[in-house]
Amino acid sequence: MCRTCGCSDGNMVTVGDADGDHTHILPDGTVIEHQGHSHDHGHSHDHGHSHDHGHSHDEGHSHDHGHSHEGGPSKVEILEAKVMEKNDRLAERNRGWFAGREVFALNIMSSPGSGKTTLLERTLRELDETSSVVEGDQETARDAERLRATGVPVVQVNTGTGCHLEADMVWMGLQTLRPELGSVVFIENVGNLVCPALFDLGEHKRVVLFSITEGEDKPLKYPHMFKAADLVLITKMDLLPHLDFDMEEARQAVATIAPDAQIMEVSTKSGAGMKGWYDWIRDAKRAAT
Amino acid sequence: MHELSITRNIVATVVEHARGRKVDGVTLKVGDLAGIELQALRFCFDICAEGTCLEGAELHIEQIPGRGRCLECDERVPLEQPIAICPCDKRARMIIEAGEELLIHSMEVH
Ligand SMILES: Nc1nc2c(ncn2[C@@H]2O[C@H](COP(=O)(O)OP(=O)(O)OP(=O)(O)O)[C@@H](O)[C@H]2O)c(=O)[nH]1
Ligand SMILES: [Mg+2]
Ligand SMILES: [Zn+2]
């Protein structure tokens, strides 16, 4: 049930801005807009696309399942279609959109409570770059409100029952957000160390937070998330004296899964390591746009 | 649970290819390193197939074991996790050769 307009939901996605205008996307791709001015989403859900079947694996073996329902023999049609193809294609569209505006996009991921919103709050206040945020959350607008308090534009994308952002949700969010030319877009993904890993959003870089209260072996337990990370931020470093956290072991665990990822230690609370993070953003942005 | 969204994609893709024909079965190829919970996938499949031409279709899953190749010793290693460093004592780089597949291999139609 949508809190703003009272319409009932199934498992739909909601995109909203600070004025309470919002849009629902139903599971079948139907878009419903509520209140006030309407945004130009201009997106299509791309039916009738064709897959590239040109490649084939496994030297044409055929399955003979032999059973048939409702009369007539059934025949096997080889598809070899990539399951993630639709999201990947929409991610590619986001990439093009970012490139056209020289916007630098970061996908920020971690388990719930590792410190994504807190990191962004401080970053938005201190980083000397024009920024805006796509905030992915399952239910509430709490994190979006915290980030709006910094004075930066934030668009909230409620994923409903979905535990991750997908490329089309980010696309919708961007149409509302309309980030400035040459700016930085931070995408705070839903707090979850499994699901967001599989969905390319068209971002330039993936940042994974890993707080020292979570244990050194997190990367080994959730390799899919860490494997695609460009930067791993080890967070809440101010708590180190109170914990038995083995930093060397943690770094080894990251390196085993993501040997090319950079690793940085930060404390949003004390500010330690934050300069390195800002430098990384600026360098990565310069290299990407 | 991302398997729900993934299953929706599977059903939508098959529906598109079936063009109204009844689908009796779908065969997927899922690598052991693809990050997919097969149990969850099967559970979601019946739900997502309901009311489409895939309703009642059988889901066959061909599992593909993970395999890495060490760039140092050229050894092929079975993998249960997508690690990028060879378990050999050199801690050398390893590339994942198999196990990350996530494909709709085929469908049975009539
Ligand atoms: N001591 C300490 N606490 C921190 C730090 N960063 C964040 N926290 C605390 O960790 C808790 C969770 O922080 P959030 O920023 O809300 O975490 P999140 O990753 O955005 O959480 P979700 O959006 O729910 O996934 C809060 O109580 C923060 O105050 C830090 O550097 N040091
Ligand atoms: Mg948050
Ligand atoms: Zn080796």
Image (cartoon, coloured by chain):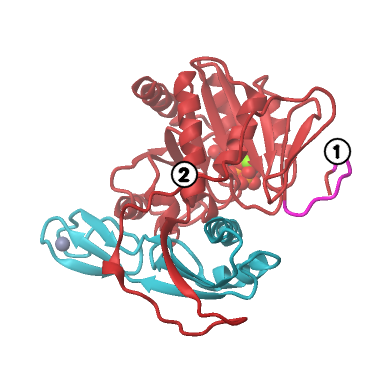
**Furthest-right residue in this view:** A6
Rendering quadrant holding ligand 2: top right
Q: Which residue is mark 2?
A: A88
N-terminal of the pair, mark 1 or mark 2, is: 1
Give the amino acid at mark 1.
Answer: Thr
Q: In the rendered structure, which segment of residues is drawn in magenta?
A: A3-11
Q: Which of A245/B68 is in front?
A: B68
Quadrant for the C terminus of chain B in the image: bottom right
Give the amino acid at mark 2.
Answer: Asp
Residue at 40% over, 73% down: B62
Spot occupied by residue A218 in the image (x, y as percentages of width and height): 45, 57
Are dots 1 and 2 in contact, CB under 8 Å? Answer: no
Q: Is residue A6 magenta?
A: yes
Residue at 55% over, 45% down: A48
Indicate which disc residue A4 carries. Answer: 1
User: Would residue A42 be seen by someone viewing this image from the given angle?
Assistant: yes
